[in-house]
Amino acid sequence: MRYKGKTVCITGSSRGIGRQLAIRFAKEGADIVIHYVRNGDAAREVSGEIERLGRRTLLVRANMADESRILSMFEKIKETFGKVDVFIHCAASGRNRSAVELDAKGWNWTMDVNTRAFLLGVQQAAKLMPDKGGAVLALSSFGSDHVFPYYTSVGASKAALESLVRYFAVELASRKINVNAISAGMVKTDALNHFPEMEQTMKKVEAKIPYSRMVVPDDIANLALFLCSGEAEMIRGQVIRIDGGITLPLV
Ligand SMILES: NC(=O)c1ccc[n+]([C@@H]2O[C@H](COP(=O)([O-])OP(=O)(O)OC[C@H]3O[C@@H](n4cnc5c(N)ncnc54)[C@H](OP(=O)(O)O)[C@@H]3O)[C@@H](O)[C@H]2O)c1
């Protein structure tokens, strides 16, 4: 049990990748802050599953675009657990448009949920991390440095997120807080339902992966459990790709 006695806060843990991260960290002994914004039933279901493992959970609803809700989430964490050992920003949203069609409102929304929430969240989480240190992880994607159809706003938000990871990694190193990012290839989750022409795009992606299978949430959980542990203490401010090699071939 690598995370026994630890408190792990995972934004966007009601569904998809965040949900699996919550379950895997709980299986390793952690108490979990489960966060969601709309799908309360899904979040309660994850909470029940984790409590059946004998772990404690705190369920928090907070729109990551709203600064006051982020601050109050950390107030609740402080009241319930008194600390946070690991903070993972997994929640994400986006306006799925081409660059020439992207509007300012969609840009701002995406940057607020995906990137500004990480800035504000890490600032708060760091205050609640014990003197012996902690870990922060950001979920990024191959769209941060590659071009993917209709992914403009999310891709730009993830590029800025990766930059923030490097700044925090340097500033928080003296406090023994390790900050890294995982850049994942495509994972079949609800997130893909909102993209135009996704079925054709997914077929093209699957055909191009050198390792011939899509990334699954457990692949990401395996890496997250390592990166947030003491075993990864000399990996700082890095963006680790997990994509079956899809970003390697030029043709
Ligand atoms: N799926 C992929 O192909 C892929 C690839 C690379 C990286 N990623 C990254 O991995 C992370 C998880 O992706 P996923 O595919 O698992 O996503 P998902 O299934 O769509 O789940 C999104 C999660 O974020 C929460 N969320 C959405 N908007 C929010 C907001 N405004 N405020 C607070 N929470 C909000 C959702 O809460 P509700 O359930 O309440 O709506 C849900 O828990 C994201 O950062 C994503 O960019 C995904």
Image (tube, grey):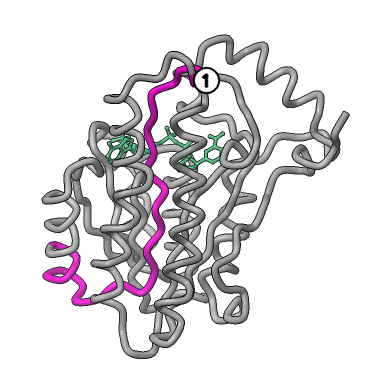
Residue 120 as seen in the image, left or right of residue 233:
left
Percent x, y of residue 191: 46, 28
Which image quarter is the C terminus in? top right
Instruction: Tell which of 74 and 52 is nearer to you.
Output: 74
Q: Amino acid at mark 1?
A: Tyr
| Extreme residue in the front direction | 100
* Residue labelled with disc 1: 150
Percent x, y of residue 27: 48, 63
Which residue: 40% across, 84% down?
133
What is the crowding at mark 1: few (fewer than 14 residues within 10 Å), some, or many (at least 20)? many
Residue 218 in magenta?
no
Which residue: 64% across, 57% down?
240
Residue 99 as seen in the image, left or right of residue 15:
right
Q: Over which residues does the magenta segment extend?
A: 76-99
Residue 63 sits above or below residue 167 on the image: above
| Extreme residue in the right direction | 251
